[in-house]
Amino acid sequence: MTSLDQFVGNIRQLSIDGKFNDLAQTLTNPNLDHLSKNIQHIDSIIATFTLPEYSMCMLAGLHAITKAPNIPDFDLFLTQVDTFIQTCSAEQVHYLPQYLCEICHVITERLRKENRARVGIPILYRAIELLRREPGQLLSIHSDLYQLCLLCQWFEPALTYLDIDIIDINRENGKFDVKHLLLAYYYGGMIYACIKQFDRAANFFENVITVPATATSAIVIEAYKKYVLVKLISGSTSNNQLPTFTSRTVQQAIKSLCGAQYTELFNIFNNGTLTQFDEFVNHHREQYARDRNLGLIKQTRNAFICMVIFHGSPEKFDANNMLSKLQDETEKRMLTEKQLRELERQISLSKAYIQRTQQSSPYHDRPKILN
């Protein structure tokens, strides 16, 4: 009997015996990675893993396929993954959430390159439903779903999750990268900007900017650029200061990397004329085009033209129902703020975050959708 046969027999027996902790340790042991080393036999191997009985074994087989230099029949692989998600044992998959997330990352990147984003949205949506343990839990693949929704302008699946405040992060057995938190908020902000919910968009971009950091990601820089524009569009023109809890590293990076095309636009919007605004925008048009922000710039101009038009409000702000509404909104925002601070604390203590902040590059991880 070959070592591969012994390995397959062993993991099958562990699955039969319900020893899922032992099975997870065996499948993730790099010294026992017989599936990736025998990728030429992987189709015949996974054919022996019936679902849902051998869900972890099948998941490991599909994961091994993504580690190969290329996936010969990608459409077949998509079908295999989708079938797995719909028929597997959720209990077993929760022992290896990082494997399914890594599979989804590969699928997202491949579909992005092939301009077939819409194909992956149902698969990722079902994967999130399978893995998340409560409505407000964030997975790394939320950012994948949001990116695909942006690429094909199909926002409803993303809004299902974006409209729920994040209260927890699935650690994915220690494999969660803070980059996915930044991207989830960044892509979420872009989606809200697309549907013209600019206050919500500004809140999401602000969350990107204020995540604790000792090194600045390019995601943060891009978020700041859009943060300035959506604030102006939404009418929040009184203050251009970053939140007080923004890290000094991020503040310095924004000052040095964003330049006048964004930091000075706020002042011109508040104190300049339309002619000055147009001259400034035309002078920096190439930069706005590179940032793919010309659409937001156009809407900012429209907001500039309309900002002196005031409309009377029929609301009586001293009425009891209005005071009650304001109190409810205040309490909701305070709760969200508390939850975000707790997430930031957990992130700052995670091994993945600490390792990332020790990288030498001060400017990395540009969102792929911007490339």
Image (cartoon, grey):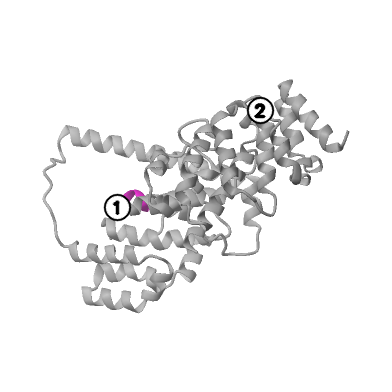
Q: Tell me where residue 42 sits by quadrant.
A: top right
Point out residue 200 in the picture as x, y percentages from the top left corner. 34, 48
The part of the chain drawn in magenta is 196-202
Q: 22 or 52, which lies in front?
A: 52
For the stretch drawn in magenta, the main secondary structure is helix
> From where the camera sits, is residue 249 visible?
yes
> What residue is disc 2 on?
50
Q: Residue at x 31, y 66 (%)?
A: 297
Q: Residue at x 58, y 60 (%)?
A: 215
Is 197 in the magenta? yes
Q: Residue at x 72, y 37 (%)?
A: 44
Point out residue 8 in the picture as x, y percentages from the top left corner. 78, 32
Is 308 in the magenta? no
Q: Tell me where residue 276 sits by quadrant.
A: bottom left
Point out residue 316 in the picture as x, y percentages from the top left corner. 13, 40
> What residue is disc 1 on?
196
